[in-house]
Amino acid sequence: MSPAVTSVHVFDFDLTLVRAPPRHHGESVLTTEEIASIGKDWYKSPLSLNYKLKLVPLPALALLKSILGSTNQMGVVLTARHEHLRDELLSVLKKFGVNPDLAVLKPNNLHKDLSNYDPVSQISIRAAENAAYKIAAIESLIQSPNVNTLKIYEDDDAILNAMYTWAATISERRPNLTIEIIDAKLLNKPFSVMQYLKNLDCVPTDNSHSESILRELQQLSNAKAVVPFGSSALHRRGDIDVCLVIEDNESHRDAVLRVADALRKHGVPDVYESGSSRCPLLKVHWLDSMHPPVDLDIVFVHANAYAKFTPGSTKISVQSTDPNERSLMGLEMLHHIQSHVASSPISMDVFARVIDTVLLVLKAKYVHGTHYNGLPSFKISALIASYITGLIAAAPLKDVVSDFFNYAASISQVEWEDKWLDGVYVSPHLLACAQQALLDAKNATQDSSFPSSGTLSRLTQGREPSSQTIISLHVVYAEQESWKLKQQFNWKFAKSLRNLYQAHRIEVDPMPEAPQMERTFGLLGDVTTTINFFTEFAAVITSESKGLIAVDVVGTTDVAEESIEIAPDLTNDGVLSKFPRTKHLLPSKSISRDDLVLDPTDAAVFVNTEITIQEKVDGANLGLFLTNDFKVVAQNRSHFCNSETAPQFKGLDIWIQMHQFELIDLLSPPGRYVLYGEWLFAQHSIAYSKLPSYFLAFDIFDRSNQTFLSVKTVQTRLEVTSIHMVPTLFTGVYKDLSQFRSLLETKSKYYDGPVEGIVIRKESSDVLMERAKLVRDDFIQNIDDHWAKKGTVKNKLQFL
C-alpha cells in the first residue's frame, strides 16, 4: 500500500457490486457439457461468472469506480469467493470498467468442510467463518498509521453484525480511525435505464473538477482560449476533448512540445505527444489526490483561424491536411450535434444517456473505439443526433433507447460506410459484428419486460468469438512511463491492424483479454501470415521505444486454454512452463499496485516451521529445457529467447553451448524438467561486480508431477555440474514475520552492497511447498530510470 493512502474503501462482491444469477438461471445459458462440469457448489465454479450469464451491476459499483485512481484513496474488493476464481472475477469487473486497486479472495485452506453439519448449521458456521476471514483481511489493510478512514460495503446480515462488533473494539485501539459500515442492500434501487447507467458511473453529477482542470490548463498553456468539445460538452462522463487557441506565429507541433513541457514542470508527468503532421495532438493523464484521473485529448488552432471559424457555415473537408481545419472539425461536429438536439423534442441529458447506452452495447461486444478500429464515439453521437430530430414529441428515456435500436438495426452496410462512417476506417468484420449487436439490442429492448435488470444485462453481454484460433499480446511497459508508453502502443497497434488488412486483407476478432494480456483476438485469416505480422510488429515497437515496450506474441489453440502458452509454428516441444509470479510476504513501500501480496493467513505458514531463504538477484528470468531431439531451448517468461532476442541476452547461446552436455544430463528425459535461473548479462538496477557466471540457477520444475524440487535436491543435482546456484542465506525457523526483514540487510555475494531481496521457501525433503519474496524498499524507490533507457551495460564476472 502506498504511504499516500489515507482512506481505504472495502467492497464485497456478490450482491454488493454485482448480482450474479443463481444456479438454475445460470445453467439456462450453458451447454450440457458445461453444466456437467460445475460440481456441487455453483459459486465455486468459474462458470458462475461466465460472460454468457446475466451479470447485473449494482449501485456500489459506481462508488468503487469513483475513487479508483485517486492517490489518497484505495478501492479494495474483498470477497468470500475462492482464490481460484480470481481471473474470472476480475474479468467481470473489467467488463464493467472497474480495475480495483486490490482484490482479496478467500484462500482454499480457510474453507472448512461442513458436509457433516445440517443445512441450518452450515449457513451460520460459514457466515462466521467468512466474517472472521474478512475482518482479518481488513485489519491487515489498515495497519498503516496513515490510514484514517475506513468504509466497508457489505450485504450479508451476519457478516455486518460481526463487523459492527469488531468496529467497536478497534475504535478503542485506533481512536483516530473513522469507520463507516454500509449495508449495501440499502443502496439498491428499482431498475431503469437511468439507474443502470448510474450503477456503471456513466452519469456525471458535478462538472466542477473538469472546469477546474480546464482553468489550470489555460493558465499553464498560456492559451488565448480553451474550448472543450466531445463527451464533456455533451453532458457525458469521459475524456475531455479540448481545443487550445494559440498564437499564429507558433507551429502546431511546437505548441504540443511547449505545453507538454509546461505540464511536466507543473507535476503532470503523464503526457504523450501524439497525432500526425495533419493534426498534432497532446494526450494528458491528469491525476488528483481526491478524484479519479482524467484523460485529456488536446488539439491546437491558430487564433486567426479560430476567429474566422463560424460553426455551421465553415466548410471543412474530412480529407483536409490543414492542422487548423483538422482541429476545428471537433468544434464543427459539436455544433452540428447541439443544433440537432436543440431542434428535437429531446433534452441534452436524455440524448447523452442514449449515447451512453448505445456505447455500452458496442463496448460489451468489442466493436467500439480505435483500439481495434471499431465504431468511433463521435460518429455514433452524430447518428443519434440525426435520429432524434425525426421524433415528434418528448418520450421517456427507455422509449427513446428502444426506438433508436429499432432504427439502427435497419441501417445497411452500404449506408453505414457511405453516410455514417464517411472518412473513417472501421474494420469490415467489426462493422458486421456491430450490426448484429444493434439487432440483438433491438430484440432485447422490444421485450415487454424492458427495462428490467435481466433485459438491461442482456444489452451488455459479450458475444461469441468468431474464431477458435486465438493469439494474445503480452506487453510490459517500463514502470516510470507506463501510461505514456501505453498510449504509444495503442496508437501503433490500431495502425498495424489497418496495415494488416490493407496488405493481406486479414482481420482479427477482438475478445476479452486473457489474464495478464494486453490484447486477445481471434484470427480470421491465414494463421502463419498473421502471427508473422504481429511478431514483426512486436520487434518494431520494441525497437522504436528503445526497449521500454516489450511485446510477446502468445498463441493458444483454444479459448479455454488460457494457461498454456505456445510459441507459433512449433510442435509440442514448444509448450512453455511459465515461471509463476511470486507473491510478496509482507506489505512494503516498494510494492506497486500490480504486485501480489500474501494474505496474512497465508504469510503465517512461513513462521514456526523449517524454511530456506535464498538471495534474490536482479536480472532476467530464464528457463532451460530439452526438446525431443535433445536441443537445449531457452525461454524468458512466456516467449523463447536467444542471443539475438534482445541485447540483454547477449552471450546466452555461447553459455548454452559451453554447458550443453551438462544440461542434457540434468534435464533428461526431454520435456520433463525445466531449469530456472536469472540471466545477469545486463545491469538492471544493481551493478554486479563479482558474478561467477551470467546464469545463476534457483529452481528445477518437474513437469511430470507439476512440482518444483527442493533447494537441497537442486543443489545435489548441480554439484556434479559447473552451473552456479544462488546462495542460501538461512535455513531454520523464524517465530515472527518481522524477523524476515533483518535479512534484507545481508551483504550480497555478488557486489559491495545489500541484497536486492530474499526468496523464502517452505519445503519438504524433496519438493517446494510454498514460496514468497521480500524486496528492499529502496531497491525500487531508488530506480531513477528504467534500466533499458541507459543502454546495455554489462555486469562484471569474477572468477575464483
Image: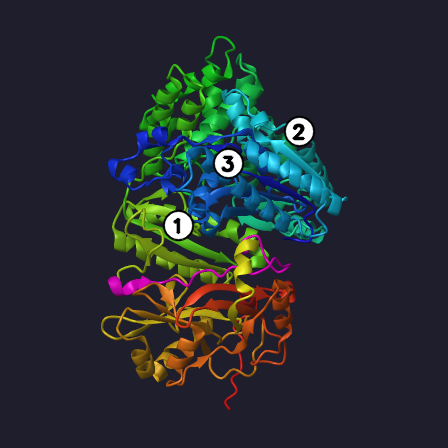
Q: Residues within 10 Å of mark 1 (few under 14, many from 20)?
A: some
Q: Find the residue positioned furthest to the bottom.
A: 800
Amino acid on which the number 2 mark rests in the picture: Asp
Q: Residue 613: image x %, image y %?
A: 53, 72
Amino acid on which the number 1 mark rests in the picture: Ser
Of pointers 1 and 3, the one earlier in the residue sequence: 3
Q: Which residue is mark 3?
A: 124
Q: In terms of secondary structure, where does tag 3 sit? A: helix
Residue positioned 25% across, 62% down in the render = 572
Which region of the structure is painted magenta? 571-599
419 and 394: which is toward the camera: 394
The mark found on residue 36 in the picture is none
Calculate the distance from the C-alpha at mark 2 to the C-alpha at mark 3: 43 Å
Q: Residue 532: image x %, image y %?
A: 31, 57
Q: In terms of secondary structure, where does tag 1 sit? A: helix
Q: Residue 222: image x %, image y %?
A: 72, 43
Q: Which residue is mark 1?
A: 496
Calculate the distance from the C-alpha at mark 1 to the C-alpha at mark 2: 39 Å
Numbered disc total: 3
Residue 63 in view (yes/no): yes
Q: Residues within 10 Å of mark 3 (few under 14, many from 20)?
A: few
In this rendering, is residue 517 above or below 22?
below
Q: Find the residue positioned furthest to the right.
A: 175
Q: Are marks 1 and 2 in contact (CB under 8 Å)?
A: no
Q: Which residue is mark 2?
A: 206
Residue 222 in view (yes/no): no
